[in-house]
Image (tube, rainbow, N blue to C red):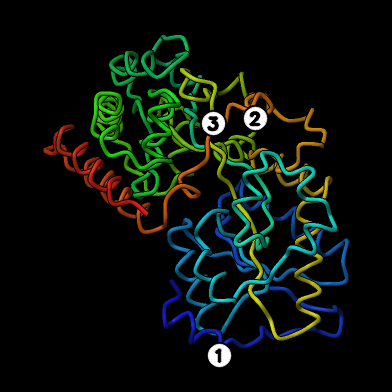
């Protein structure tokens, strides 16, 4: 349902300043890619746009995570100061903006470029679609069901690198004895919720996962299948004591430098390993599905284009939308980002071992939809608040947090 603030925005929207003498249009692009690996990746988009069009990429990086950037992005759009393009996650994050008529319809571009023929999996294009119209350009596939393991840390403890989560938990005392924090974890709510989601995918079967995350079955969420997930999450919070960092890339750096044994995190962590000059299989190991199940969720990033009252800006927006999904740009960007390409028809033979694992899982069809697609932003926020409270307050029992989780699932939209 459209809120009054969104309706008011339709009347108040103004154009971004346009056109310098040197370019047909200056296009401001907002995003939250500010870590070393992320910055290297988004630079590939900017380079391609500046070299392949007559327009100019104006970088609008917003420091912090998506949780910090999204309210700023939305506020600007509904407040009448829209950017030319903006990163969001494909799914339901822009639903109200689209319903309010504030986003450019990309259907003609998508049809002309044949997106439906090569976007893989096709559900990611569906996540950009509302009422049969396409409103975003998906640019990558990110999955969160990974644990990243430091070879240096396990060598310090005199241990082999674990092959699954249970072996990792068993190795914790030896890591601690060697002065290594077992599990690196940043102190942001979305990171703790991500870890819970990764454990859920790893530890329950497809049927139970689907009942909770797709069918919103509170009985399964509060039942024995998910009890195992909460017990593992309880172990995780104990293993992360001493991991006193805030941002996700700071936690990744603890793994890179051998100060932590591992990190449960999304595949974008690969960008940080690459910037640090580390080699997959040699300096670090990645375990999809935490070593238990070769299955990944398929979330990721997309670009939306707020409507502008300027034909040159709109032309630049459409050129960028097409360019983001072009073959060479997809390869260049995703190799730097550590994500999987949205195209199923490009050569990724130069990708590292971890990316190859992800590509094999994707090609086998062992994928699940991400939370951004299944749950509204409000429900996601409730999950994040719950998991963060449990993570930080060790007086809360597994039974209590599971009951609270089931209640959120029961009321989820």
Q: Which residue is mark 2?
A: 362
Furthest residue to the front? 131
Which badge, 1 or 2, comes first in the chain's sequence? 1
Q: CA distance from mark 3 to mark 1?
A: 42 Å
> Which image quarter is the N terminus in?
bottom left
Residue 399, compared with residue 87, is above or below; it is: above
Q: Which residue is mark 1?
A: 11
Q: Position of residue 54 (x, y in %)?
A: 88, 71
Name the residue rendered at 22%, 36% in the picture: 402
Question: Who is closer to the viewer here, 330 or 249?
Answer: 330
At label 2, counting other C-alpha atoms closer than 10 Å, the crowd grade (few under 14, some 14-19, many 20 or more) is many
Name the residue rendered at 62%, 42% in the picture: 141
Look at the numbered disc 2 and give the secondary structure of its residue.
helix
Report the side of 83 relative to 52 (left or right).
left
Which label number is shown at residue 85? none
Q: Quadrant of residue 406?
A: top left
Furthest residue to the left? 395
Q: CA distance from mark 1 to mark 2?
A: 43 Å
Q: Position of residue 156 (x, y in %)?
A: 42, 16
Q: Quadrant of residue 56?
A: bottom right
Which label number is shown at residue 296? 3
Q: Position of residue 79 (x, y in %)?
A: 50, 83
Q: Position of residue 356 (x, y in %)?
A: 68, 25
> Which image quarter is the C terminus in?
bottom left
Name the residue rendered at 71%, 55% in the picture: 43
């Amino acid at each position: 349902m459209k809120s009054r603030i969104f309706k008011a925005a339709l009347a108040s929207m103004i154009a971004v300043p346009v056109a310098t003498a040197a370019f047909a249009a200056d296009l401001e692009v907002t995003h939250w890619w500010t870590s070393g690996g992320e910055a290297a990746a988004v630079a590939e988009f900017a380079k391609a746009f500046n070299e392949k069009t007559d327009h100019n990429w104006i970088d609008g990086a917003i420091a912090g995570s998506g949780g910090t950037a999204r309210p700023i992005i939305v506020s600007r759009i509904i407040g009448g100061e829209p950017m030319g393009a903006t990163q969001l996650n494909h799914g339901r994050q822009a639903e109200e903006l689209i319903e309010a008529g504030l986003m450019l319809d990309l259907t003609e571009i998508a049809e002309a470029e044949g997106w439906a023929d090569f976007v893989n999996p096709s559900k990611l294009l569906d996540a950009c679609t509302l009422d049969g119209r396409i409103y975003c350009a998906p640019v990558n596939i990110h999955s969160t069901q990974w644990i990243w393991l430091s070879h240096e840390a396990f060598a310090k403890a005199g241990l082999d690198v674990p092959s699954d989560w249970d072996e990792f938990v068993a190795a914790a005392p030896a890591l601690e004895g060697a002065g290594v924090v077992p599990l690196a974890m940043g102190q942001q709510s979305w990171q703790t919720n991500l870890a819970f989601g990764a454990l859920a995918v790893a530890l329950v079967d497809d049927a139970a996962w689907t009942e909770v995350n797709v069918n919103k079955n509170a009985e399964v969420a509060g039942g024995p299948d998910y009890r195992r997930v909460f017990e593992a999450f309880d172990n995780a919070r104990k293993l992360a004591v001493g991991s006193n960092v805030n941002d996700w890339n700071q936690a990744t750096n603890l793994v890179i430098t051998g100060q932590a044994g591992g990190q449960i995190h999304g595949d974008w962590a690969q960008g940080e390993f690459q910037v640090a000059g580390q080699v997959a299989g040699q300096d670090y190991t990645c375990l999809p599905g935490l070593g238990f199940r070769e299955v990944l969720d398929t979330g990721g990033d997309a670009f939306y284009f707020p409507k502008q009252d300027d034909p040159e800006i709109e032309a630049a927006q459409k050129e960028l939308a097409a360019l983001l999904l072009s073959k060479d740009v997809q390869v260049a960007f995703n190799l730097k980002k550590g994500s999987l390409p949205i195209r199923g028809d490009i050569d990724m033979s130069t990708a590292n071992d971890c990316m190859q694992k992800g590509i094999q899982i994707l090609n086998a069809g062992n994928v699940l939809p991400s939370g951004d697609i299944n749950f509204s932003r409000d429900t996601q926020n409730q999950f994040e608040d719950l998991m963060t409270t449990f993570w930080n307050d060790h007086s809360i029992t597994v039974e209590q947090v599971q009951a609270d989780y089931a209640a959120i699932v029961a009321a989820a939209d």
